Amino acid sequence: MDYYDLIIVGAGPAGSTLAQSLQDSGKHILLIDKQDFPRDKTCAGWVTPAVMNTLNIDRDDYSHGRTLQPIRRFRIGMMGQSPVENDHGDVVSYGIRRCEFDTYLLDRVTAPKMLSTPVKSIKREGGNWQVNGTWEAPLIIGAGGHFCPVAQLLGEGPGSHETIVAAKEVEFEMTTEQAQSCQARGDTPELWFCRDLKGYAWVFRKENYLNIGLGREDNHRLTEHLEAFVQDMKDTGRIPSDL
Ligand SMILES: Cc1cc2nc3c(=O)[nH]c(=O)nc-3n(C[C@H](O)[C@H](O)[C@H](O)COP(=O)(O)OP(=O)(O)OC[C@H]3O[C@@H](n4cnc5c(N)ncnc54)[C@H](O)[C@@H]3O)c2cc1C
């Protein structure tokens, strides 16, 4: 059994940020994630300047070889109706790609990382937490997102007390032709509310990447809602018709 002062389960933004902030504490930390990085995470990829500042992300450094889309406007509407566009003039947010953003944060961590390593068992033994029968620590942090095994151990997690919002999302690079025909603008994410107000969809262009998704409180007929939305966006020219 390998001994650590702290084991962090989950190397997303929460886990990697905690590991980095404890870097100079002299503590022996292990960061575990079931996935290898770069990995995708279902997310529109919209972060505010406050997030960039809090995480000490140098925008010039970050934008080298990564997508950092400045946002100045929003286009907001009810599906099937005309949208309104609010112009903030200045940069009020950024579009990032989670595969890049999360890897950037993780690369700053110098503590040992066990990636491609699902946490399958957590046991309390002699005052320590034993993970997968291999590593032990007096402290364990659950940063595993929605299906965090530490949260599940504590009786938390999906369905325990919160409303579940189900979402479907895709992010891909457009071809040159698609990028030319796409009317959605990078500096203007689009938010479209479902007519029953149980959810909303987004069209978020980041340079030549397009992120489209829809989330609803009521997940019945989620695909139907998404398909109708995508068709509407194609019909109105917001996204390329050949997607
Ligand atoms: C559809 C959708 C759109 C969103 N859009 C935005 C947005 O535009 N802007 C924004 O700020 N937020 C957005 N969010 C929220 C954002 O994605 C989360 O708040 C954020 O990812 C939480 O970070 P985290 O580090 O806590 O968890 P996560 O990013 O989920 O990371 C958790 C990590 O834990 C790992 N893990 C899980 N289980 C195990 C296990 N058993 N063993 C080992 N590792 C494990 C996972 O592999 C993962 O890497 C969106 C979320 C959804 C669902």
Image (tube, grey):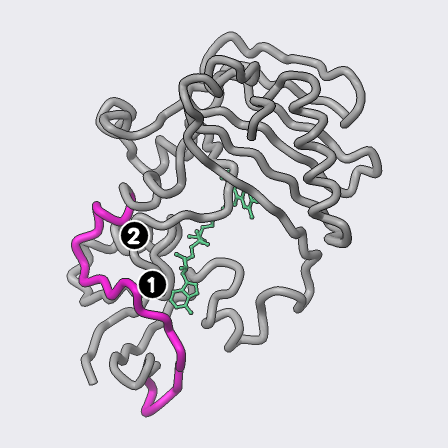
Residue at x-position 56% and y-position 18%: 184
User: Can see residue 213?
Assistant: yes
| CB atoms of marks 2 and 1 within 8 Å | yes
| Residue 171 place in picture, x, y as percent | 47, 37
Residue at x-position 31% and y-position 78%: 138
Residue at x-position 38% and y-position 66%: 141
- What residue occupies the far bottom of the structure in this picture? 126
In the displayed structure, does residue 116 sit left or right of residue 216? left
| Residue 209 place in picture, x, y as percent | 43, 28
- Looking at the image, which is closer to me, 34 or 1? 34
| Residue 170 place in picture, x, y as percent | 52, 40
Look at the numbered disc 2 and give the secondary structure of its residue: loop
Label 2 vs label 1: CA separation?
9 Å
Image quadrant in which the C terminus is located? top right
Span shown in magenta: 105-128
Label 1 residue near ligand 1, CB within 8 Å:
yes
Label 2 residue near ligand 1, CB within 8 Å:
yes
Q: Amino acid at mark 2?
A: Phe
- Looking at the image, which is closer to me, 230 or 119? 230
In the displayed structure, does residue 195 sit left or right of residue 157? right
| Residue 180 place in picture, x, y as percent | 47, 13
Q: Quadrant of residue 240?
A: top right
- Looking at the image, which is closer to me, 23 or 175? 175
Q: Amino acid at mark 1?
A: Asp
Q: Looking at the image, is mark 2 or mark 1 nearer the viewer?
A: 2
The answer to whether residue 190 is above or below residue 38 is: above
- What residue occupies the far front of the structure in this picture? 242
What mark, if any, has residue 33 been given in the picture? 1
Which residue carries the number 2 mark? 37
